Image (spheres, rainbow, N blue to C red):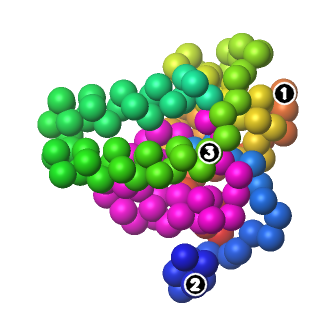
Amino acid sequence: MITQLKRYGEKHTEKRNKIVIDTGVLVSAFAFDGVPERAVIKAFTEAEIYVSPALLQEYRDVPLELETKGKITHLQLEALIAGIAAFVANAKVVYPLKRLALCRDAKDNMLLECCFEAKARFLITGDRDLLEVINLPFNLRIITPKEYLI
């Protein structure tokens, strides 16, 4: 996999960063490929992935909602479920104790809570509500999959 990453021009990260990945990035990675897929592969091979119970629940719910709404096919649903299962099998679970209210979309605060509890260095997302959060009270870089590959 590292060879595959280098072929695309991404830099290998020496230190194992702590990372949280938003559900939308995983959906894009496993259902549609492209840049999100390469970012997930890089995170999977180079970083420590963290999730929380709330994030795990969202990982479970969103694929089914997408199929119900006709946004993905059943074949894409199967690929998505298999990909997320493999991804989660290597993740570390944290149980956020601190509630945060920092994001314009209140539902996204659970991602920030997971990052805070995990002491994550990066949150990888394509969600504008999260990407536009400023003045976090803890050290976290909120970046897109493309930025993570640089």
Chain-order first, disc 3 or disc 1 = 3
Instruction: Tell which residue pokes out farthest to the front in this image.
Output: 89
Residue on which the image places disc 2: 3
Q: Is residue 58 visible?
A: yes
Q: Amino acid at mark 3?
A: Ala
Determine the secondary structure under disc 1.
Answer: loop
Q: Is residue 26 magenta?
A: yes
Q: Disc 2 or 3, which lies upstream in sequence?
A: 2
The residue under the point 18% across, 51% down is 75
Q: How far is the residue under mark 1 from the one under mark 2?
A: 37 Å
Residue with the mark numbered 1: 137
Q: CA distance from mark 3 to mark 1?
A: 25 Å
User: What span is in magenta?
Assistant: 22-51
Asked whether the beta carbons under mark 3 and mark 1 sit within 8 Å of each other, the answer is: no
Amino acid at circle 2: Thr
Magenta residues, dominant SS class: helix
Q: For residue 29: magenta?
A: yes
Which of the pair 127/122 is nearer the observer?
122
The residue pinned by badge 3 equals 91
- The mark that comes first in sequence, 1 or 2, is 2
Q: Nearer the viewer, residue 136 or 14?
A: 14
Q: Nearer the viewer, residue 86 or 146?
A: 86
Q: In front of the other: label 2 or label 3? A: 3
